[in-house]
Amino acid sequence: MKNNFKKWMIIALVAALSLSLVLVSGCGSSKPTGQKAKKEVKLGYVNWAEGVAMTNLAKVILEDKMGYSVKITMADVAPIFTSVANGDYDAFMDAWLPVTHESYMKEYGSKLTDLGTNFEGARIGIVVPEYVSIKSIEEMNNAKAKFDGKIIGIDSGAGIMKATDKAIKDYKLSFKLIPGSGPAMTAALKDAVERKEWVAVTGWKPHWKFARWKLKFLEDPKGIYGKVENIHTVARKNIEKDMPEVAQFFRNFKLNDQQLGSLMGLIANSDDALKSARKWAKDNEKLVDSWVPKKK
C-alpha cells in the first residue's frame, strides 16, 4: 500500500507541475522572454499636402529609427484638435499659428502642449495662376465672370476657409466659396491651368503646387489672411511626461522650404506616401538622425 501511495503521489506531483508549466508557457507565449511590446504613437493629420508629408515622415522615423508603432489617422481639422485635446491622438503636426488656427488654440490651448515650430514662413490666401491679370482681391468682382463667381476651397472646418468667408464679407465679393478637400482643390487648379482658364483657390505655402505651376497670391490689403505664419506641432497635455523621447523628437523636427518642398513633391508624384517618405528619409539621413534624441 505504501508503495502504491508513493507512486500515486509522484504521479499527482508530476501532473500538477506539468499543468503549471503549461499555464505559465501559455501566458507568455505571445512574446519571447525579454521582448517588450512596442509603444504606440497616434498621430492625426488633415489631407493637406504638407501635413500628409510631415506625418508620414514622422511615422517612418519613429518606427524605423526609434522602435515605436505609429498609427496615423486622417480627419478634418476640428475633430483633430478635439481628439488631441482629449488625449485620443498624441500629436498633430500641422497647426498654423498665430492666425489660421487661432480659434482652435483659444478653445483647446489649455489642454495642449505646443512642441514648437516645424516649418517657418508659411502663408495662406487666395491663389491664382500667374497669367491671371488682376493683382488684388479688391479687383475680383470686376472679373467675376472669368472666375465663374467661385473660389475653390478645401474642407469647411479649415482656418483658411473661415478667413475666406471673412474676406468675401469684408471685400464685398459676389463670389461663392466652394468647400471640398486639398486634393479636389489641386485637381480643379490643374484642370484650369491646362485649359489656361481663370481660377481662384484657397491656397497656402508650403505646397508642391508652387513647384508644379506658376502661381501667385492675390494681394490682401485688408490683411484678412494675416502675415507670414509658422507651422507648429501640438500634442496632448502630458506627452512630455509619459513619452519624453517622442516629445523631444517633435521639438527637434524642423524643415526648411527646400526640404519640405522636395518631400511634398516626392509624395505628390507617388501613389504610396509612406514609401516616398522612407526614400526621402534615406536620402536625407544626416538631417533625420539629428532629430532623433540621443540615448542617455
Image: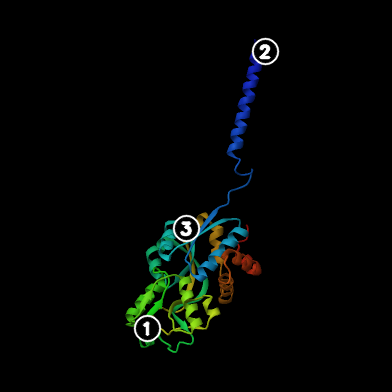
**In the drawing, what numbered circle is on residue 208?**
none
Q: Which residue is mark 1?
A: 222
| Residue 150 % position (x, y) | 38, 79
| Residue 63 % position (x, y) | 59, 58
**In the drawing, what numbered circle is on residue 3?**
2
- Rendered position, 159 above or below 4: below
Q: Residue at left 61%, top 36%?
A: 25
| Residue 116 % position (x, y) | 50, 68
Q: What amino acid is found at the position of numbered circle 2 in the picture?
A: Asn
Ranked by sequence position, the earlier of labels 1 and 3 is 3
Q: Answer left or right for 11 relative to 210.
A: right
Q: Residue at left 64%, top 69%?
A: 284
Asked whether the viewer can see residue 229, the reply is no
- Using a 10 Å C-alpha cutoff, classify the residue at mark 2 as few (fewer than 14 neighbours), some (14 to 19) or many (20 or more): few
Q: Residue at left 54%, top 54%?
A: 40
- Label 1, label 3: how far apart the Cα atoms are: 36 Å
Q: What amino acid is found at the position of numbered circle 1 in the picture?
A: Lys
**In the drawing, what numbered circle is on residue 89?**
3
- 91 and 278: which one is in front? 278
- 13 and 165: which one is in front? 165
- Rendered position, 56 above or below 142: above
Asked whether the viewer can see residue 17, the reply is yes
- Rendered position, 41 above or below 200: above
Q: Are marks 3 and 2 in contact (CB under 8 Å)?
A: no
- Label 2, label 1: how far apart the Cα atoms are: 103 Å
Give the quadrant of residue 64.
bottom right
Which quadrant is home to the C terminus? bottom right
Q: Secondary structure at mark 2?
A: helix
Residue sticking out furthest to the right: 3
Q: Secondary structure at mark 1?
A: loop
Q: What amino acid is found at the position of numbered circle 3 in the picture?
A: Tyr
